[in-house]
Image: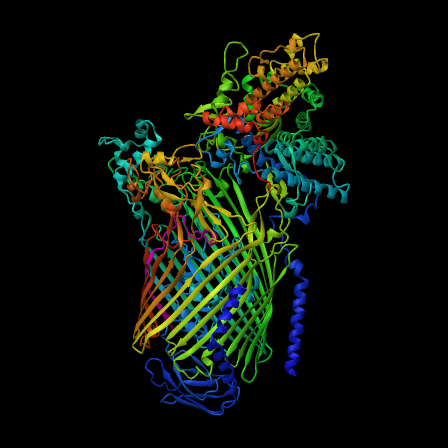
Amino acid sequence: MNRILAEYMTNIKKRGMWRSLLLTVLVCGVGQAFAQTTITGKVVSNYDKSPISDAVVTVLNTTSNVRTKKDGSFTLNDVEDGATTIRVWSPGYYESYVEILGRNTFEITLIGEGRTNYINIVEGTFSDNNNGVLSNNDYRDGAVDIEQVLTGEMTGLRVLNKSGMVTEGGMLNFRGVRSFDAENTPLIVVDGVPYLPDLGNSPIIGGYSRGMLAPFALNDIKHIRLLKGAETARYGSLGSNGVLLLETSSSDDLETVVEFRGNYGIAHNYSKIPMLGTSEYKRLLGEVGMTQYEDMGDLLTRFPFLRDDPNYYYNFQYNNATDWQDVIYRNAFVTDNHLRIKGGDAVAKYDLSLGVLSQQGTLDQTTSTRYSTRLNSSINLGGKFDLKAITALTYSTSRMQEQGILHATNPLLAALFRAPILSPYRKDVENNILPELDGVGQFGVSNPVALLQTADFKSDIYDVFVQANLGYQASDRFRVNAMLGLFSNYTRQSSFIPGLSSRTILPLEEGIALNTARAGAGQASNISWNLYGTYQKQWDRDDAFFGGGVQGLLTTQEYDAGSGRNTSSDFYRTLNYVNNDGRLFWGYNEQWNWMNIYGYTQYNWRSLAKLDVNLSIDGSSVSGANANRFGFFPAADLSFLLSNTALLKDINSVDNLVFKIGYAKTGNSRFLSKIGQAYYGSQLYRQLAGIIVGNIPNEGIRWEDNENWQANLIFSGINQRLNVNVGYYFNRASNLLNAFPVSPIGGIDRIYMNGGAIHNQGLEVEMNVAVIDNRDWSLTWRGNLSTLNSKVKNLVGGADMLYQQENGVTRINRIGESPFSFYGAHFLGVISSDAQATSLGLQDYKNRSFIAGDAHFDDINQDGVIDNEDQVLLGNSLPNLFGGTSLSIRYKNIHLQGLLSFSKGNQMYNGLRRSMESMDSYANQSEAVLRRWQTDGQLTNIPQATYGDPMENARFSNRWIEDASFLRLENITLSYKFGQHRLNVLSNSEWYIVGENLFTWTDYLGLDPVTAYSNTISYMGADYGKIPLPRTFKLGVNIKL
Amino acid sequence: MKNMSMRRSFLVCGIATIALALSGCSRYFEVDTNDILLDKDYVKESNELYSGYMGVASKMQALADQTVFLSDLRTDLLEPTVNAPQDLWDLYNFKEKPGNSFANPRPYYDLIVNANAYLNKIISYRKERPTAVEEAHYQALISGAIRFKVWTYLTLGKLYGQVAYFDDPDLNLDKIGEIPVIGFDELIPKLIALMESGVDGVNGLYETNWGNILYPGIPANQQDLVWNMICPSPTPLRMELYLWNKEYEKVVSIGIPFISDGGGKRYKISNEDWNGEWIQAFTRDPITRTRVLINIVPYDFERNQTNRLIRFFSNEEPSVYYLKPTEVAMQRYESQLRYDGHARGDRYRGVDYTYYFQNGQWVIRKFSRDRESASEIHKNNVHIAIYRDSDVHFFLIEALNNLGRFGPAEALLNDGVELYLSRNAGNLEKPFDDPIINSHFAINLGIRRRVSLAPVYPQGLSKGDLDTDEKKQAYMKALDKLVAEETLMESAGEAKAYFALMRIAKRWNDPSILADVVSAKYPDGQKEQVKGDLMNEKNWFVKYELE
């Protein structure tokens, strides 16, 4: 990378223009100082250039302060030397800051508050900060979680909604895969406190992982800021995946304000898979059956309805035409209500909120309610002391269902598999529906309605946040703070899957568990502390901000769970009734501690260049005894404020032009502390506990390294109507934790070593264009686009690393390829004829020949045998390109806006489709199997139907890897904002209707191209049959009193 | 000035804070969760020594069934079914690839790593606290750990032909690469030395009653008896080692007193385990079968301790039916002449006992009998025998044969000592020339007569006509082959027969003894190729890279 940077710098040198520009910057900047005493100007509106009267014009850090006249003009006399910035403010407009830069005449355009995402222009992506910022003013109306408002909003940040199961939230990924085995999610920092929840999938509810930001009520979050550059180094070995700063709401002024936000809507599922109808299903059933039973009579005994006998007594049981996908879904009611009261006096300010988020899932009977409360207060303790105190409590209670390739208990799979000829309920001979649910019967498929109505998957979660931040304002410039924060999560989940009495749900554990009970409780806590100080210093025309401190984090996670089976009846649902056989207890206990000494400075050189330097020395409990405990993480961003140079500063159409380059070294120590420790574990031998060697420790284990180089050109002009940020980054993650296969002599399979490397690079472009911006009309277009190129550059020992995942999926890390690429058989089509089969002469490793109608897999090693030696790379789940774009139109007080998100080039394993096209059992299948091979010579891409699929035609192969590129219309909102109204409750209120997840353009054949099995990066791009995200229509109101 | 002093105080405060933070660092970063025992904290209490021993012992559970699959898939007993995964098929086809999960010797080395660490821990602990552990317990714990290690190394050697031999208790990645790999022939003397010399003055011969250690003062109950069976007993282990080392006299001299059992009824191939009762040793509660079973690996389904024997052998759901009996193996049982001298078929070990026709397929039934009902079949916790009565008998038979004492050898193999005594009165050979021994052995039926089969003798040779050394050698070899043949039936699925074939083929430097038997189960095209491969001794062993 040094080479690349050097080349880059060389290119810059080659460009004489740049050199002369920089020289001019320096010379002109220096030459034009010390002369101002009087400043005049005019403040105008962005809408129509009309003057703004009574706008407050202040020179920062001085006593100069005037109001504009009717014609918008102002005169500031006797402005002190060293004054750098003018601040202008007027009601209805955003506050504006203008650098003086030796000028004495100004025309200052104020931007009306209707401009969308303006914060990003003044202090985010389009400023020299170069951070994506989203404020609560710009959240999409009707959104209920943080992931939802982040989707498609920030360059580099990919937000993948996990499913339509309520509270699952989304998976976050910043600029690709940066680690094989350590955490890959951005560090979440809430009000200055790192937040490290337990991100694992629930051991109790299959395929469920709670959204990592689920404890936070969206309306309590004031700002969301994504750090990408040098500032990430302040978090040392936590910063490698980017840092997402959340700032919660607080009272800014003394006025008492009551806010209510509420929305009410209906969600419905619109994504279905076309399945076989009754006659097509029967035909398939017969065909599969004939491959299991040699004797047709046996088949007809099992499936008597296959006889065309109208007098068969039990015909009433099989004469249905049920669309099971319709049966399991419902129109679901969703509502979010949030009340805030804030205000205070000179001594204490408070911000108290109460929220109730109640979401029914479109999957019938699933529901979640979250109650949240938060009290943020700031107290002036007298003297120079002040205290900020935060207390927040969230309680969520949910009823879920299982997801994933769990044939017995995923109601979605059961609905797809269930024979259409069956009824959800039993019937009498007169064809009357009885209240009792229909059983599994001879089909081997659970009744999905039984799952929804009688299976319990409950989750109760408590989250507590407490934070105290004591400040001491030693002087105007020097401030010291001591902060202590606590986050505690308690999760209790339980499940009960009936079946013993009802026989409506397929037994688990290979038929042994007629009913199953599970329960688990977990606790995660973060105790964080931070002692820090800040110091501001101004020189004549330069200023600097220094900060530094010591911070730390003590985290623990513990989980204890039990499961058992076969309680004496489905009525008894707790663990104390399960059989001794099959009782299982498990859990984990992890601790992880971190300490970080950090310092930073933000130095502003004559408003022409800014240098941000961040340094930290950082240690964590992951380092082994023979490794360095502390790492040094330096970073610097250098911004050239080109728009402030003499050449450009007087060009009104250029508001901001910045060239920014940066380097940041961070690390990743977010992995288990136990890897570097020598320890013993326990193993029961019959009823006695044995102590066993737990590992071969790698006492040299240490944090992973991460280096990031980036360069951005940031432009904001034409009264901030055209805003562009074009950036390029190159990221080198090295010393990555690498599960190195150890010789069997060690008694273990793998040992973790530092040594892997991944390179990520990409181009990031973000734009915000106010195409029309006048008082009655405005039209704003925003968009962001990120490219991603992620490659494994090194592995310890150089050998491929294979990962076996659920449902027979294999992934591979191979040098030169994308991380976690799919790896499997190469499906070339279906062997169409006996002649072709003979000429191919392929066998499996059991010496059986592939015949006509079987899959034709590529015999990679040309040995005539299709086996594990014939696996090839099948693509990867990372996109080449992703982002979002939105359009916002306003006519007077009516707003219409919509947002599209997109992703291109990401591959997905369609496990759901594999289940729907395998034709290896008596389950119903998708309409695609109508194309199955049936006659010699038939050209098709769907193999023949065979019970048990002995030739493994449906094995993991590229047949199931699909391009999951998509363009999704995330939402369209129509809103009306009242101004002052005689009905007080309507004043300043906003009423809206919103449609969410309205349409998705994709070639992907699954239910939803946007899905994630877990928060783990290695599972990205796996469609394991999750509930698709529903389409939602909501009506909502934001009232401010 | 004010600013200066403030800056100074800030600096001082900062440095002090940092210094304070760093000084407390080492403890700050130490994490000690409740689910691990840090190396530095083990051993703190003497009771952890017993737990440590159990930890070593528990590792046997992971490797016992693997030993069966690896060795019996290489005899003519088993072949994979269409359900079997590629790894089993590769083993069957002698094409195991790197990473083959069944071929991986990791579980064996896991036990050795644990045994080494444990021996180090107990010896260090005793040095620090000489009186903390009773001498008898100390000896029993060390001796047991040695035998676990020796048995495991012996098994590794038999399966893989080479082992990485080490005693280092603190293995790390660098050391793993430096461990010497030694061949099987070099291994055996090492193991014998370890058994006889031991460590810290304790050899591998010490046994104890675990009931007294685990439950002191409480009368022995059934649970306790099983604990006495979990560790390979010194004598069978030594017998096997000496047999491999061709020290036949030693095998006999320690084997006979062991089987005599001071006149007890154990290990006699007695009439009390007559014919059909034989099968019960493999499925019934082991403490009711202590006459047959010497050492076992017990499992406990209720505590999630299972093995894969029934799961792989049975075709009753939820078993997966990966391995099935071969035609040639079944034919061997079917062709046996019964004791009546007329009928054919091994009535008590053959069909319905060792194998069975169930759900339209042939299955190995030896371990699933009594457990075939829907409520039992899934439990998968049938014990696996390490040593049992027939093993020590076969060791003795082989040793006696190779000492030229054909009469006693054939007596133990065929129809028992009592008949031998009556037939050869006045011409008794060692060891059955001792009235006390003979009285103890009177209940011995012999391996074959116990299951009502007629005696077998080397064909075309007569004991009375062994006037030359060549003839004697020929008789010896033929009898050895009969022993191997008998082991294939008696010990089917017990991880014994393949090793007997190897030992005997090696002894006579005649790979065809093994190659002929093993290759017979393969289809015609493959038969010759397999046989050709097995004529090279190197191909007998499971291939798995240790690097």
Specify whether A426 is left or right of B310: left
Please tell me how many numbered marks the rendered image carries: 0
Is residue A1024 a member of the stretch shown in magenta? yes
Residue A940: image quadrant is top left
Decide: is B96 above or below A295.
below
The residue sitting at 74% across, 35% down in the picture is B202
Q: How is the image coloured?
A: rainbow
Residue A311: image quadrant is top left
Using the image as rendered, state which of residue A670 and residue A833 is in the foreground: A833
Image location of residue A919, percent across then percent down? 34, 39
Is residue A666 a member of the stretch shown in magenta? no
Image location of residue A334, percent across then percent down? 35, 58
Question: Quarter of the image containing the C terminus of chain A?
Answer: bottom left
Using the image as rendered, state which of residue A306 and residue B492 is in the foreground: B492
Image location of residue B129, percent across then percent down? 76, 44
Image location of residue A207, percent across then percent down? 44, 49
Residue A390 visible somewhere in the drawing: no
Decide: is A486 above or below B257.
below
Residue A508 visible somewhere in the drawing: yes
Using the image as rendered, state which of residue A989 and residue B77 is in the foreground: B77
Query: What segment carries the magenta color?
Result: A1013-1041
Q: Farthest residue to the left: give it.
A: A310
Decide: is B264 above or below A384.
above
Specify whether A37 is left or right of A1029: right
